[in-house]
Amino acid sequence: MLRVVVLISGGGSNLRALLEAAQDAEFPARVVAVGADRQADGLAHAELFGIPSFVVPYSSFASREAWGEELLNRLREWQPDLVILSGLMKLLPHQVVAEYSPRIINTHPAYLPEFPGAHGVRDALAAGAEQTGASIIVVDDGVDEGPILAQRRVPIEPGDTETSLHERIKPVERELLIQTVLDIANQTIHLEEYR
């Protein structure tokens, strides 16, 4: 059984989908804890499913590195096989990446390497693109630059706003995330190849 810790900053819709999938006794992964960098709305999903949660408030630390040290301490408590960044809006400090990569994956609402960064949906619209997508990547020290594990295209429709486009990307992200976790747990994807 794959032990998973999910890190969030917001509403946690991907987290919720993963928790629902893990309700199936046949699903080969379990979320053992949920962490956040603030009092995120998505922590309510952890509570609802009886999953322990923790908050390491970014604003409480003098530096990104100090925040990273405390985040590392909290992650180590749960001994995860896999760390999932699901809407975590902070770049992980190097020491966290160094300890857990390539066992850290991230969801991103664009078809990488197109439109990396915090505003992938907005940037796709601003560029006048006809399509964007969703990607699951291995986290490295770059900004959405790690190896791509899975991705799928999503068309941009006339009249799309940032909100409407993001709402159509989210279900694709959720499907990709659940399939990627399955593939890692079943060893169809071998993360050690990405060291």
Image (spheres, helix red, strand yellow):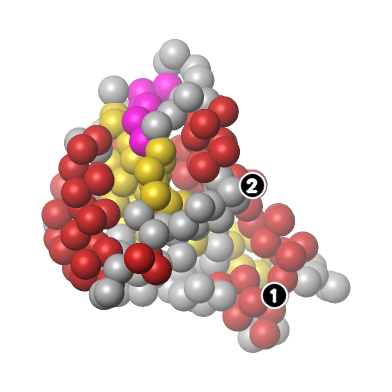
Q: CA distance from mark 2 to mark 1?
A: 19 Å
Q: Look at 46% across and 57% down and name the residue there.
A: 38
Give amino acid for label 1: Glu
Q: Is residue 171 visible?
A: yes
Locate residue 120, reporting x and y percent: 56, 73
Q: What segment carries the magenta color?
A: 27-33
Q: Nearer the viewer, residue 90 or 65?
A: 65
Q: Is residue 29 left or right of residue 45?
A: left
For disc 1, the marked residue is: 130
Examine the rendered structure and indicate whether residue 180 appears above or below residue 149.
above
Q: Nearer the viewer, residue 160 or 152?
A: 160
Number of numbered discs on residues: 2
Of mark 2 and mark 1, the one earlier in the sequence is 1
Locate residue 133, reporting x and y percent: 58, 62
Q: Look at 77% across and 63% down and name the residue there.
A: 164
Examine the rendered structure and indicate whether residue 183 appears above or below residue 194.
above
For disc 2, the marked residue is: 171
Label 2 residue SS = helix
Q: Which circle marks residue 52 in the picture? A: none
**Is residue 28 covered in magenta?**
yes
Q: Magenta-highlighted stretch: main secondary structure?
A: strand
